Image (cartoon, rainbow, N blue to C red):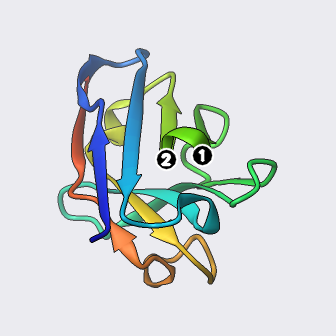
Amino acid sequence: QVQLVESGGGLVQAGGSLRLSCVASGLTFNRYAMGWFRQAPGKEREFVAAIRRSSGSLYYGDSVKGRFTISRDNAKNTVYLQMDSLKSEDTAVYYCAASYSGSFTYTDSYAYWGQGTQVTVSS
């Protein structure tokens, strides 16, 4: 049974930082690209970041590029999202997802999803 469990969300002031973690189980972790998406009230789910099976290829949505960093530790079956210089518009539920193939910026490329973790940025 595949499970993705996010953690690390919370309330932070604008300009602050958070580090999200996602621990995967029930799959061969290093066979999957991993991604982060977010969904804010009244908006569709938005691509945030992705990392290929090889850690050398990273992808970011335009709204977070330069502020967020995705990384993975295959030995720990974990993907991270380091979020710096947070803005109020970053407030959303953040979801971890696993993709075996496809275009990593699209939700339909991901086979498995976590339950989400709330990130709230106050101004």
Q: Position of residue 2 (x, y in %)?
A: 32, 68
Crowding at mark 2 (Cα within 10 Å: few <14, some 14-19, many 20+): some
Say whether marks 1 and 2 touch (CB < 8 Å). yes
Position of the C terminus, as image quadrant, is top left
Residue at far right of view: 56
Q: In the rendering, which numbered label is found on residue 74?
A: 1
Residue at 55% across, 48% down:
63
24 versus 121 height, above or below:
below
- Front residue of 102 and 67: 102
Residue at 60% across, 71% down:
104
**Left or right: 13 as drawn, with respect to 27:** left
Q: Position of residue 68 (x, y in %)?
A: 57, 35
**Left or right: 123 as drawn, with respect to 19:** left
Q: Position of residue 3 (x, y in %)?
A: 29, 61
Is residue 123 at least partly visible in the picture? no
Q: Position of residue 61 (x, y in %)?
A: 59, 55
Crowding at mark 1 (Cα within 10 Å: few <14, some 14-19, many 20+): some
